Image (tube, rainbow, N blue to C red):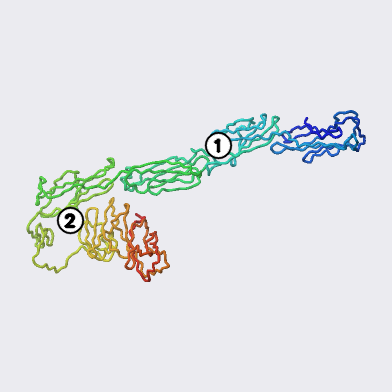
Amino acid sequence: MPSIYSTKEKNWQLRLDYHVTPHTAQNQSEISCEIYIYNTGGNSNLNTNGAYYRIQASGGFDSGRVYKTYNWPDAAWHYVGKYVFTVPHNSDGTKLITLNGYWNAGHETTWTPRDLEAAATVTLPAIPRASTVSAGSFTIGEAGNVTIKAAVSSFRHRLTYKAGNHTGNIPPSGEKLSRGDVSWTPPRLLLKEVADSTSLTATIYCETFAADGTRVGKSQMPIKLYVPTDVCPTIDHVELVPVNTNKWLDQQGIYVAGYSQVLLTAGATAGEGTVLKSMSVTGFGTGNVSTGNVSRYQLSWKSPTLTAGRKVFTITANDKRPGRAGSAKRAVTPYAYTPPAITKSDVFRCNAEGQAQSDGGYIRVFCSAAITSLSGRNHLTLQMRVRPAGGAWGGYTVLTNGTAKVIPGFSAKRSYEVELTAADCLGRVKTVAYTIPTAEIALHLRPGGKGVAIGKYSEKEAFECTLCAEFTQPVRCLGGIERNILTERDDLNAITQSGFYYWGDFVIPNGPPEEWGSSGRWCELTVAGDCQEAVSLATGVRMQRRKKAGQWLAWECVNPPMEEWVEYRTTERFRGKPVYTKLVVHQNVSLSASVTNFTFAHRIQNLDAAVAIIGRVWKYQLPHILESRYTVIREVTPEYIGLSLKNDAWGNDLTWWFVVKYTKTTD
């Protein structure tokens, strides 16, 4: 038993013995203190209220005065009394305490001191507390270790966890464990607790029990639970179906550039424990994004009309966990397609053997055409039909591709029109027309006396001439001259013959824009296959257009006259896109020297990129730089033209011109 001693006085000394009994479960110790006095003997005090002892300890423990009579005849350590008390320990099981023993003899003599005292600060044995655990991060559904650091080897432990709203045991059986590593696999049902993130902070609790089953305490530590990287949305199915408005193509179920669209349907499932946020399609055309808080999703999307070349579509599904996505790729390669083309053809009068003869009663027809085979699905139909000039068409005659055919029954005294037609299964047609003139003759009078022809047989009550005419005297015309005058009912798409045409002050259907100066005047119209060119005889403005995939494109101006505020689509290209031009004019503009920035509205719709801009004011072209003064074009935005100026007081009532070349977002 440990002891604390006082100093010796007159051969007397006090000894304070103490004994510590720990109580682990209560985290406290029982301390038993005993006081002993040593003297040389022959001393006594029988007064009951004379001598006393007192035992104290820090924390308010105090035995109070305990009176004691004594009679000690011999020299020895004499037992005086004891005091027992219980001390609580700190939360970590440690404790420092000051013990004090006091003796008062009740009197003082030559041989007896009045009092003795012994005191010391004592460190009590530490009481083991709850054990602790350590662990790294865990991936849900994958095994990891939790290490128990037992405070005492005989301790037993129960491990539990809390993740979100879910609690459970480690291991699931809930058994009490000793120390060391414990394997734990966070159950996949915890994925529901982390529906909108990829990680979750959970807590592991360690409850400690003494060997006798008494609960010692409880510790805890936070851990990170991560969603496995393979837990992400999955694309369940993808189906691509061709959509064709062309009836024959629809029956074939194939993709053809310029005709077909893709109808894409897809389904997706969110990663375990969460819901889908969106699905999208990218790769060709504008992707479609759909959102919804569901675990499964169905997406339906139709592409624009396909162009030639392989098209890859990427279907992506995103759930509510950031960065988690599933995708699938599908591709289609549409057939490249061009309409039927007549590559070579010829029609002329001949004899029965097919030899050319200007007055022959036969015609020789040859036609060679080509189509896009579409892997053998597409087929060519080559036909011809005939009508007398000005008469009704007869029925169709089938031709053999690349083989000449001699056809009888053509009077030398009549002219005929022959139409060759190449068609394919898509319904696209290419037509070539021929005129078979009458037999050549110097002069012919029509029977009945009301028709005359030079160089051919007369076929109508009119004067016909196939020869070049030269007159040595003035020609007088009393009945006027018939011209190619168009009306509002005419359509430039239907005109296939070159010539001079006139239309009034109206917009001819499918004609050049009226503001380009194309109406109310003569135009020379040149038709060459899939191209048309119109030249205004009054202004010299030259306009062109062409066909693409059987459709006429917009008119384009070769030499725009640049009228104020008129937009011209030109034949120029910038990065493959049509270039437009406009003359922007602002009048009566006044600028003072204090103005450093100024803007002019350009009234351009759907501006994409400004290709070039030229500005002018008074007699100066911009940029205008004179010593330290300048005026420059700073920018062209979708709304205005911006200038930067320095110390330039241009004056009042000025006119500013800007020629802008640009592309448009609509092309």
Q: Where is 401 relative to 523, above or below?
A: above
Give me the disc on residue 138.
Answer: 1
Q: Work out whether residue 645 or residue 315 is closer to the camera in this orientation and state it.
A: 645
Relative to 647, is 3 on the left or the right? right
Seen at 50% across and 39% down, the residue is 231
Kindly tell me whether residue 253 is visible in this rendering.
no
What amino acid type should be assigned to the residue bearing mark 2? Gly
Location of residue 568 with respect to 187 vertically, above or below: below
The residue beneath circle 2 is 391
- In the displayed structure, 547 sits above or below 70; it is below
Quadrant of the snapshot with the N terminus:
top right
Q: Position of residue 142 (x, y in %)?
A: 53, 34
Nearer to me, 222 or 417: 222
Q: Quadrant location of the C terminus?
A: bottom left
* Amino acid found under the numbered disc labelled 1: Phe
Residue at the spot x=18%, y=48% of the render? 345
Q: Are marks 1 and 2 in contact (CB under 8 Å)?
A: no
Q: Which mark is residue 383?
A: none
x and y percentages locating residue 434 in the rendered image: 17, 52
Q: Earlier in the sequence, mark 1 or mark 2?
A: 1
Query: Residue at 44% across / 43% down in the picture?
Result: 316
How far apart in space, not on screen, are marks 1 and 2 (Cα)?
Answer: 92 Å
Q: Position of residue 285 (x, y in %)?
A: 38, 48
Instruction: State the image quarter where residue 68 is shown.
Output: top right
88, 108: nearer the viewer: 108
Question: Dot 1 lies on which element?
Answer: strand
226 left or right, relative to 563: right
Can residue 660 be spotted in the picture? yes
Question: What is the secondary structure assignment of the residue under circle 2?
Answer: loop
